C-alpha cells in the first residue's frame, strides 16, 4: 500500500478523499475502495507526478481530522470518489472547494449517480465506457495535469467565497457574469 512518509518538500501532493474498505454504492453494488485506491487512483496520481496521500495511511500520531483538513487545505491537488454518496466525502469536497481554487478531480464508479448540486462538474468514471481501468487512470492523470495548468478555478464556489470575504459595506459582492 501507499504509505505517506516524510518526503522532499518539493514533491507535489494529492490528497485522496474517498471511502475505505468494502462499501456498497447507492445501487447496492459492492466496491473494494482499497483496491480502487491502489490499482487506479494512486497509480494515476503517481503517473501525474504527485505523491498520493490518503488520511488512513498517514503515519503520525494525533488527530486524523486535523491531518485531513491540513491536506485538504494545503495539498496541490485532490481526487474525490463520489461513488457511495458518502456524506463525509461531500463534506470534505465542500471544504476543498471553499479553500482551494484548483485542482480537484471528481471520480465515481460507472453507473453511480451524481447529486444535482455538482452534476455539471466533470467526473471521471471507472471503469471507462469500454470497461478499461487504464483509460480511467489516464483520464485522472490528464485532469490532474490540466488542473495544474488551469487559469480559472475548477471550484464552483472559491471565487464567490473570496469575494464574500470583503467588507460588504465598502466593497459590494460582485455580480457573476455567468
Image: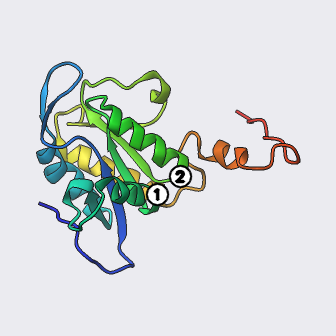
Residue 127, percent across and down? 20, 36
* Number of dots carrying numbers: 2
* Residue ID at (16%, 42%): 33
* Residue ID at (20%, 57%): 43
Does residue 16 appear in the picture of this structure? Answer: yes
Q: CA distance from mark 1 to mark 2?
A: 6 Å
Residue 152 or 128: which is nearer the viewer?
Answer: 152
> In the rendered view, how is the structure colored?
rainbow
Residue 8, percent across and down? 32, 81
Does residue 124 appear in the picture of this structure? Answer: no
Q: Quadrant of the N terminus?
A: bottom left
The quarter of the picture where residue 9 lies is: bottom left
Do the residues bearing badges 1 and 2 touch, measured as CB atoms within 8 Å? yes
Does 76 sit above or below residue 114? Answer: below
Q: Which residue is mark 2?
A: 99
Residue 84 or 148: which is nearer the viewer?
Answer: 84
User: Helix, strand or loop at disc 2?
Assistant: helix
Residue 175, percent across and down? 78, 35
Q: Which residue is mark 1?
A: 73
Q: Quadrant of the C terminus?
A: top right
Residue 83 located left or right of residue 104: left
Query: Are there few (<14), some (14-19), or many (20+) residues within 10 Å of tag 2?
Result: some
Query: Are there few (<14), some (14-19), or many (20+) residues within 10 Å of tag 1?
Result: some
First of labels 1, 2 by sequence position: 1
User: Helix, strand or loop at disc 1?
Assistant: helix
Residue 144, percent across and down? 39, 55
Amino acid at each position: 500500500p501507499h504509505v505517506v512518509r516524510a518526503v522532499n518538500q518539493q514533491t507535489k501532493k494529492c490528497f485522496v478523499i474517498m471511502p475505505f474498505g468494502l462499501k456498497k454504492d447507492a445501487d447496492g453494488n459492492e466496491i473494494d475502495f482499497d483496491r480502487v485506491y491502489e490499482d487506479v487512483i494512486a497509480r494515476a496520481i503517481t503517473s501525474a507526478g504527485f505523491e498520493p496521500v490518503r488520511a488512513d495511511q498517514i503515519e503520525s500520531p494525533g488527530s486524523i481530522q486535523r491531518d485531513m483538513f491540513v491536506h485538504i487545505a494545503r495539498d496541490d491537488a485532490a481526487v474525490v470518489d463520489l461513488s457511495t454518496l458518502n456524506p463525509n466525502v461531500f463534506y470534505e469536497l465542500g471544504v476543498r472547494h471553499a479553500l482551494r481554487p484548483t485542482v480537484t478531480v471528481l471520480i465515481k464508479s460507472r453507473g453511480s449517480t451524481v447529486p444535482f448540486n455538482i452534476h455539471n462538474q466533470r467526473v471521471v468514471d471507472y471503469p471507462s465506457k469500454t470497461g478499461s481501468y487504464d483509460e480511467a487512470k489516464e483520464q485522472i492523470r490528464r485532469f490532474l495535469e490540466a488542473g495544474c495548468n488551469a487559469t480559472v478555478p475548477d471550484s464552483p464556489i472559491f471565487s464567490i467565497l473570496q469575494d464574500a470575504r470583503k467588507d460588504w459595506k465598502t466593497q459590494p459582492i460582485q455580480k457573476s457574469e455567468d
